[in-house]
Amino acid sequence: MKVAIVMGSDSDLPIVLKAVNILKEYEVPFEAHVMSAHRTPAEAADFAKNARANGFGVIIAAAGMAAHLAGVLAAHTTLPVIGIPVKSGALAGVDALYATVQMPTGIPVATVAIDGAANAALLAVQILALGNEQLAKRLAAEKQKMREQVAKKDLDLQEKLA
């Protein structure tokens, strides 16, 4: 299965590239598209309606300001949708965070931090790993590596303070 990355504007690309890099690292196929919940609502709805049939397992949606993209996509699919609120405008992404996280019952959107594209991609990989043992092993190995790095930092701190 592949991941769809949909951004509301090409100006979101610098943030979205963090997700792209993670998906490449885990060798997860993906497609990236620009669609707007407000300027191309029919196209966004059509994309979401056909996403499963087109081989997608997860949709990541990145948008700033009003940030209705993730909700519009989620309204038209049963696939998991992960929203990335993008920092923009006078409210520095808080408006996008609220728009992405405050969904009505029945239209869930998993939401990561403002500009949290790396975690969005990792969450997508974790979802796909439910049916892919190789991905699950790679994720487990990465978590073990993080534990070892923290343990080393703790040991280094103890030596500095001794």
Image (tube, rainbow, N blue to C red):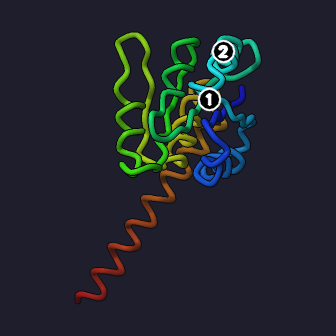
**At 48% from the left edge and 27% from the top edge, which residue is drawn?**
68
Residue where numbered disc 1 is placed: 36
Q: Residues within 10 Å of mark 2 (few under 14, many from 20)?
A: some
The amino acid pointed to by label 1 is Ser
**At 66% from the left edge and 30% from the top edge, which residue is drawn?**
35
The image shows residue 12, relative to residue 5, as above or below, that is: below
Tags 1 and 2 in contact by the CB under 8 Å rule? no
The image shows residue 84, relative to residue 160, as above or below, that is: above
- Residue 42 is labelled as 2
Q: Nearer the viewer, residue 75 or 58?
A: 75
Q: Position of residue 14 (x, y in %)?
A: 62, 54
Helix, strand, or loop for circle 1?
A: loop
Q: Position of residue 99 (x, y in %)?
A: 39, 31
Q: Quadrant of residue 65?
A: top left
Quote the CA–CA distance across marks 1 and 2.
9 Å
Sequence order check, earlier mark of 1 and 2: 1
**At 42% from the left edge and 38% from the top edge, which residue is drawn?**
96
